[in-house]
Image (tube, rainbow, N blue to C red):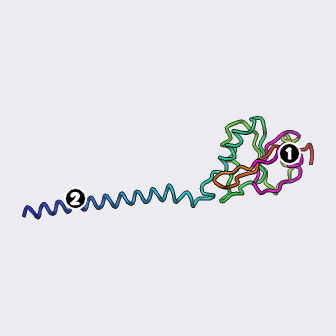
Amino acid sequence: MVTLVIWALARKKYIWAGLGVILASILLLNTYAYFWIYPQTLPNKNTPFAKNIADYINQSVSPDLPVLMYGCCWGDWGQPEPQAIKFQIATSHDFFQIEKTVPLTAIPIQMWSQRILVVTAPDSVLPRALTENSLRDPVIIVKNGYNIAKVYTTILPKSL
């Protein structure tokens, strides 16, 4: 009789130990799936285009230089989002975004005849008015193997 009680108690301990091993295995598998597998399935392998563009602007561009984003959303799932770039710029840049289908005359008048920073898709072909007075060769921002954006400084002409 005593051996049956001891056997029953020992069996319960094995059941609890087995459940503990199963729960620990589930926890480990879910952690692996969430932190290692899941990010690889996100758009552009979870590369934050807007953050990387804003970081470049914050670190490499003088605060008084206006920023013109020509086009938008060239990465997977519509990144970079122009407002995301604007909100992550730490310095006080004037920021304006224009779609490629909109005429360049929609660019605010205060940006004409002065230096501006143009941000666009890495493979974008730009209108002549945006490239003819370029002050330096374009810089391609690369992160995680992705060409995130083409960035360059130019002077917009007084008129088109």
From the image, which quarter does the N terminus lie in? bottom left
Q: Label 1 belongs to which residue?
A: 134
How far is disc 2 from disc 1 in space, using C-alphas?
75 Å
- Taking the spot 21% from the left edge, 61% from the top edge, the residue there is 12
Which residue is more in the foreground, 146 or 91? 146
Q: Is residue 105 visible?
A: no
Task: State which region is magenta.
Answer: 113-139
Q: Kindly identify the amino acid type of the residue bearing the numbered disc 2.
A: Lys
**Disc marking residue 32:** none
Of the two numbered discs 2 and 1 on the same chain, state the one appearing first in sequence: 2
Residue 11 rendering spot, x and y as whole percentages: 20, 63
| Local secondary structure at mark 1 | loop
Residue 14 rendering spot, x and y as whole percentages: 23, 61
- Taking the spot 73% from the left edge, 51% from the top edge, the residue there is 149
> Looking at this rendering, what residue extends furthest in the right direction?
159
Residue 113 rendering spot, x and y as whole percentages: 88, 40
Count of residue discs: 2
Q: Is residue 24 left or right of residue 80?
A: left
Is 129 in the magenta? yes
Q: Kindly identify the amino acid type of the residue bearing the numbered disc 1.
A: Ser
**Disc marking residue 13:** 2
Is 116 in the magenta? yes
| Local secondary structure at mark 2 | helix
Residue 29 rendering spot, x and y as whole percentages: 43, 60
Q: Is residue 75 visible?
A: yes
Near mark 2 (Cα within 10 A), the count class, few <14, some 14-19 or many ≥20, is few
Residue 114's place in the image compared with 147, above or below, is: above
- Taking the spot 69% from the left edge, 38% from the top edge, the residue there is 59
Near mark 1 (Cα within 10 A), the count class, few <14, some 14-19 or many ≥20, is some
